[in-house]
Amino acid sequence: MSRKKSNSGLRFQPAGGNRTAQVPVGKKQRLQIERLSGDGRGIAFIEGRTWFVSGALGGEEVEARVLGARGKVVEARLERVFQASPERREAPCKHYDRCGGCNLQHLPHEGQLALKQRLLAEQLQRVAGLQPEEWAAPLSGPEFGYRRRARVAVRWDVKARQLEVGFRAEASQDIIAIDDCAVLVQPLQSILRHLPTVLRSLGKPQALGHVELFSGTAEAVLVRHVAPLPEDDLARLKAFCEQANAQLWLQGEGQPAPVDAAAKLGFVLEPWGLELAWRPGDFVQVNAQVNSLMIQQALSWLAPQADERVLDLFCGLGNFALPLARQAREVVAVEGVQAMVERAADNARNNQVHNARFFQADLSQPLAGAGWAAEGFSAVLLDPPRDGAFEVVQGIHGFGAKRLVYVSCNPATLARDAQVLAGQGYRLKRAGILDMFPQTAHVEAMALFEAG
């Protein structure tokens, strides 16, 4: 049976309904901001879409420019303020409107702390149905000049035949040229100010990957390279670091290594008379002052006694384990990466700490069968990465610990794990935020749980 051809020109028939046109990138829109989101962006609602506007505050009427859109969600950046919030301040950094590093400089520090406190409380209530018996005051230090490490983006522009040096723009791979960063500690600000000039003077800048800056017991510059550096370029980098009184570290295909094999890099925990060695690539808290306050608060909350055995999970270089060992009979410290375990053990030996033992274990798996866990523990401290410690906390009650301090860099996974702990009979006694990253919406927190 033959079929008559259609003259409509359509190959497919519409399924029905109207398809919503996507919001184009670059479009400008006038919006009424209702409140702040958990990441510090203003939220607005218009024509069935939710807009997230960086740089905006609750209650403001603004014009925003679209950075990207997907479905009913539009991401945008503030272009102009028609009606400002009484909280708004002029951002102290001249690069604020382009750099993607600090997203809350337009909000005074007190407002930043209140936002982070609200986010923590909301997560605990929404995810776990919990609120602490007591809220602790925020732990904070200086709002500028606090950051002791930074990554500087470097890219060779083939068309322009020039080297781009700076920090990434928000929601973009663009590199913003920056020669002054107010959140860096002073020694790193000085290095950053002169770094672009020396990098652009190199004969083979295409070999550069990126550069990292560190400040501790010494300053250090790590140059990651994707091809061997010519001798002349290496000599320029050495001269720059000598003038800046900084160590030069290089990293090609292997691990970072200092040009001077005798170079030592570390950080000091002054309240406990400890000096911990570390290397570029190791995790270390970027805010030295808040780090010390955090350790002091953790020890105060955990209250380890001289006859107690304490477990430190996700111990890293020994940031908590070594101060804990000053008060407890014994500290068992566990980390997932063997190289970090070895460095933590070295730090203990170098500081004459003999009552801390270090072990490697897969901390994404239950730990009940580990030999070092057989005796049990009076108290436990956890400092997991952003993914949290879901598998570990499911069996934590089996250790017999009466007190548990959880240090978190992600309130969402803290709340999830708190729900698991509550199911094992632990009460959320105390919680509070740690302002490790002022001028950003990043939230760190600490919570104390006690067996019921």
Image: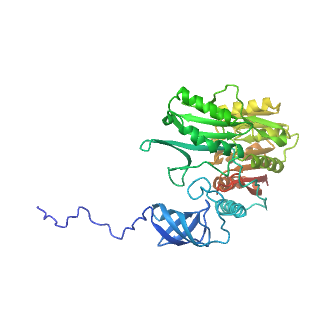
Indicate the position of residue 163 as horizontal and vertical percent values.
50, 42
Q: What's the residue at 77%, 55% (across, down)?
A: 139
Indicate the position of residue 355 as horizontal and vertical percent values.
82, 33
Residue in front for this viewpoint, 353 or 64: 64
Q: Is residue 431 above or below residue 247?
A: below
Q: How many marks?
A: 0
Q: Is residue 38 left or right of residue 302?
A: left
Residue in front for this viewpoint, 351 or 176: 176
Colouring: rainbow
Confirm whether residue 417 shows in the render: yes
Confirm whether residue 371 shows in the render: no
Indicate the position of residue 320 as horizontal and vertical percent values.
77, 42
Q: Is residue 342 left or right of residue 65?
A: right
Residue in front for this viewpoint, 251 or 238: 238
Instruction: Residue lying at the far left in this picture: please name it.
Output: 2
Q: Is residue 137 above or below residue 244?
A: below
Indicate the position of residue 109 as horizontal and vertical percent values.
71, 61
